[in-house]
């Protein structure tokens, strides 16, 4: 799964016309980092669009970033709550001194941002803001959720182009071409399953999926 995550994030930046810079020459320094396999160094060849960005990026916001170290931590099995961030030492190492030293060398001392890719935050605005602010305290400049990446890729993929070298982009193109994706979102035209038998839904089952996920976070 991690290889697919990295491939998707890499192609997301390439679709947005970023260069993904090689950093193989720093293999020795990266060897001791458990995040080495989840790092990308990206840069726009043209000047970035001037604009103020929130920590949490929205579709199109990457165009206002000139260059960045990108770490991918897309744990799709769960949402990114403050409890998850506090319980893992991984997030404290995203903006570590070692990462910054390598980034300074890759970018030849030019300014850059540290960007973290995550699965998604809570649907609750308050819980989402708390998680984002906690990541900021760890030196992370920007965070982007995987649904934002996927939505932007679907927007940028053209049904008229051939993406044969990329299985993922070609699959997205075909899904758009044959109308399995509506309004550039992951909405598949599959019919809802027919219930086996009619019945009354108990009151305690009416909690939405998002609410069930939010209830998992500790107060």
Image (cartoon, grey):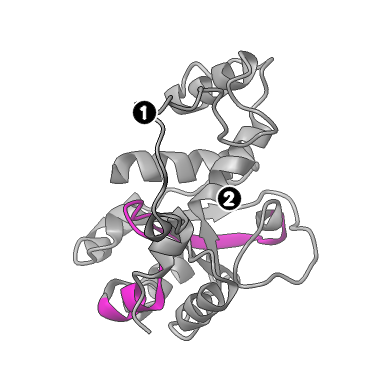
Q: Residue 187 is drawn in which quadrant?
A: top right
Q: Secondary structure at mark 2?
A: helix
Decide: few, some or many residues near mark 1? Use Cα within 10 Å; few <14, some 14-19, many ≥20.
few
Q: Residue 212 is drawn in which quadrant?
A: bottom left
Query: Looking at this view, is 45 or 196 the one in front?
Result: 196
Q: Is residue 115 above or below residue 160?
A: below
The answer to whether residue 67 is magenta is: yes
- In this view, the mark in front (2 or 1): 1
Q: Residue 71 is drawn in which quadrant?
A: bottom left
Q: Are marks 2 and 1 in contact (CB under 8 Å)?
A: no
The residue that disc 1 covers is 197
First-in-chain label (2 vs 1): 2
Picture coordinates of residue 66, whole percent (x, y): 66, 60
Return the mark for residue 166. Answer: none
Picture coordinates of residue 120, whole percent (x, y): 47, 59
Q: Is residue 2 above or below residue 133?
A: above
The residue that disc 2 covers is 148
Report the side of 106 relative to 97 (left or right).
right
The answer to whether residue 76 is magenta is: yes
Total numbered circles: 2
Extreme right residue here?
A: 50
| Residue drawn at (70%, 33%) of the image | 183
Q: Is residue 98 above or below residue 201?
A: below
Picture coordinates of residue 79, whole percent (x, y): 40, 61
Magenta extent: 63-87
Report the side of 62 relative to 72 (left or right).
right
Is residue 168 visible in this depiction of the protein?
yes
Q: Secondary structure at mark 1?
A: loop
| Residue drawn at (59%, 15%) of the image | 162
Question: Which quadrant is the C terminus positioned in?
Answer: bottom left
Question: Which quadrant is the N terminus positioned in?
Answer: top left
């Amino acid at each position: 799964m991690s290889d697919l995550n990295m491939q998707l994030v890499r192609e997301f930046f390439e679709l947005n016309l970023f260069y993904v810079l090689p950093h193989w020459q720093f293999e020795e320094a990266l060897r001791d980092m458990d995040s080495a396999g989840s790092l990308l160094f990206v840069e726009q060849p043209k000047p970035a669009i001037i604009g103020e960005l929130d920590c949490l990026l929205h579709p199109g916001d990457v165009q206002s970033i000139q260059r960045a170290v990108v770490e991918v931590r897309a744990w799709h099995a769960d949402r990114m709550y403050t409890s998850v961030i506090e319980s893992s030492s991984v997030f404290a190492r995203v903006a570590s001194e070692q990462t910054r030293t390598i980034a300074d060398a890759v970018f030849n001392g030019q300014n850059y941002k540290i960007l973290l890719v995550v699965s998604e935050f809570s649907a609750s605005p308050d819980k989402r803001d708390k998680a984002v602010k906690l990541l900021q305290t760890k030196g992370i400049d920007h965070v982007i959720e995987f649904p934002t990446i996927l939505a932007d890729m679907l927007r940028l993929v053209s049904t008229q182009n051939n993406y044969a070298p990329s299985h993922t982009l070609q699959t997205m193109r075909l899904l758009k071409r044959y109308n399995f994706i509506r309004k550039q979102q992951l909405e598949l035209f599959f019919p809802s399953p027919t219930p086996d038998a009619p019945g009354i839904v108990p009151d305690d089952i009416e909690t939405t999926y998002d609410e069930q996920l939010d209830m998992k976070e500790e107060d």
